[in-house]
Structures are given as structure tokens and as C-alpha cells.
Amino acid sequence: MSTVAERQFHLERELRAGIPAGQLRAYLQSQVDAAGRVVGAEALVRWEHPELGLVSPASFIPLAEETDLIVDVGNWMLDRICTLQGQGAFPATEGFRVSINISPRQFHQHDFVEHVQQTLARTGASPSALTFEVTESVLINDVSDVIQKMKTLSTLGIHFSLDDFGTGYASLTYVKDLPIHELKIDKAFVHEAPVNADSAALVESILAVARHMKLVVVAEGVETRAQVDFLQSRGHAVVYQGYLYGRPQDASGWLEQVKNPPGIACGNTRRGHA
């Protein structure tokens, strides 16, 4: 235990120094419609350690979440994606959005909204090209404040996605009160839906909620054709994200691939209309 604690301490110290040293990297994973056309992407942070190479997110994200470092990581990613967007790096396709994960600790910063507004103004990014992914754990503190912040940012044009939908404690209680535009089905449900009746029922319930509330649905962790067939057979337009359609790539490589797709067109389509 002492060895693990010592390693975590050193990793935290090196991450704290690595963020201002420019060691973080933005990776992107495609989100596609039923025709395989790229309609968005999720931004995923990676840490390129000068000695260890790429450090697994499973190693440093939980560590960052236990400290204030997750705020620094989140702000870095927001700045990076907004800078790229402001430079016109992303497809100009109507409805194309980049999803950015917002941690509860970052969201609950007293100046979160002001920081977002300042970042947008400084980078020239279009808020209508951004989606903020939040989990239900953001609701643990001061729900009224959460709703107010989300409404303010929604007014700017930013969309909100409720990540890991169905795994939390208050999905249906709060989803009707929040300015949510998108539900993201947890990958565990996606993996099991074709072979597990309980998971299938949960996915069908999520699709039904989304259909009635006119919300976009993103299925993450899609790895097999059977999973796609299951979702498509339920009669709801779904946006797909997972290894079946591409692994996360560094931003420059991803942008180059989208500009010159290997047989997959980035068509003029709106993102996942319900």
C-alpha cells in the first residue's frame, strides 16, 4: 500500500508540473450516423509523459479527479478544442459538434460560466459547435445552481449531453428539468443489449425517453455489427461511437483523416435527429 501511495504521489506531482509544461494531448474519437458519416467527435485527453510515454487515462484521470487537477485538465481541454474550432479546423458540416467532458468539480467552480464565456471570446470558437458532456454526479450539489448554469450556457448555443445515462441515481427525476439535448448510453448497456434481456430493456427504455423528449441518443463503446443492428432495429436514429468506427486519434491525425476519409464521406447531415 505504501508503494502504491508513493507512486500516486509522484504521479500527481508530475502531472501537476506536466500540464503547464505542455504534456497534455487532445485525442478525438469519431461519432457517426447510421450511414457511417462523421457528424461529431468526442475530445479525449491524453498525457504524454517525457519518460513514460502515453500514460493511460485510467491511471491519471481518477488521480486528477481526486484533486483540483481535474479542473486544470478540463480547462486545458476546453481551451484546446475552442482554439481548434476558432481556427476552422473542424468540418463546417451543419450540426457538427465536438463533445468535451466536464467534470463535476470543474462545473461547480464559481466562475465556470465566466471562464467558458472568456474562452469562447478569446478563441473565436462557436458555442453552437460544442457539446458539454456531464454525468449525473454533477447533480449531487445545488441542483438549482446546476440548472441555472446549464441554461445560461445553452442560451449561448452550447449543447449538453448526459453521459452514462441510466447508471446514475436520478436520471428520470432530473432529465425533464435540465436543458439536456442528448443522452449517451453507457457502453456496458450497448455491449450487453444484443445478448442480455435486462440490458436490452434498459436500452429500449432510454430510446423511448429520448424519442418522447426529442433528444439525440449517442451509443458509446460500439464494437460489433450486432450492437448496431440491435439499435437500428429499435427505430430511433442513433449516433454511434466506438472501435467499430474508429479508435481515438491525436487531433491532427483525426482532422487529416476526416478531410481525406478512406471511403467514408463526411456528409451534410444534421447530428442524430430523434
Image (cartoon, rainbow, N blue to C red):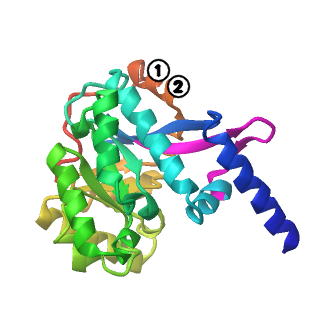
Query: Extreme right residue here?
Result: 3
Q: How many labels does the image show?
A: 2
Location of the C terminus by quadrant is: bottom left
User: Which three-letter amino acid code belongs to the residue tagged 1?
Assistant: Glu
Above/below status of 69 relative to 97? below
Question: Is the Cβ of the residue at disc 2 closer than 8 Å to that at disc 1?
Answer: yes
Say which residue label 1 marks.
256
- Badge 2 marks a residue whose secondary structure is helix
**In which quadrant is the N terminus drawn?**
bottom right
The crowd level at tag 2 (other Cα within 10 Å; few <14, some 14-19, many 20+) is few
Relative to the observer, which residue lies in front, 117 or 265?
A: 117
How many angstroms separate mark 2 from mark 1 (CA)? Answer: 5 Å
Q: Between residues 184 and 76, which one lies in front from this camera angle?
A: 76
Answer few, some or many: residues within 10 Å of disc 1's Cα (few below 14, many 20 plus, some between 14 and 19).
Answer: few
Residue 234 visible from this viewpoint: yes
Residue at which label 2 appears: 253
Q: Where is residue 153 in the image (x, y as percent from the top left)?
A: 22, 51
Q: Which of 188 and 163 is in front in this view?
A: 163
List x then y, in percent, for residue 114. Answer: 30, 48
How far across and how far down the image is residue 80, in percent?
A: 45, 34
- Residue 84 image-quadrant placement: top left
Q: Which residue is drawn at 35% across and 53% down?
A: 112
Residue at horizontal 39 percent and vertical 29 percent from the top: 83
Q: The residue under label 2 is which amino acid type? A: Gly
Residue 142 lies left or right of residue 79; in this view the side is: left
Q: What element carries label 1?
A: helix
Q: What stretch is highlighted in magenta?
A: 42-58
Q: Is residue 264 visible?
A: no
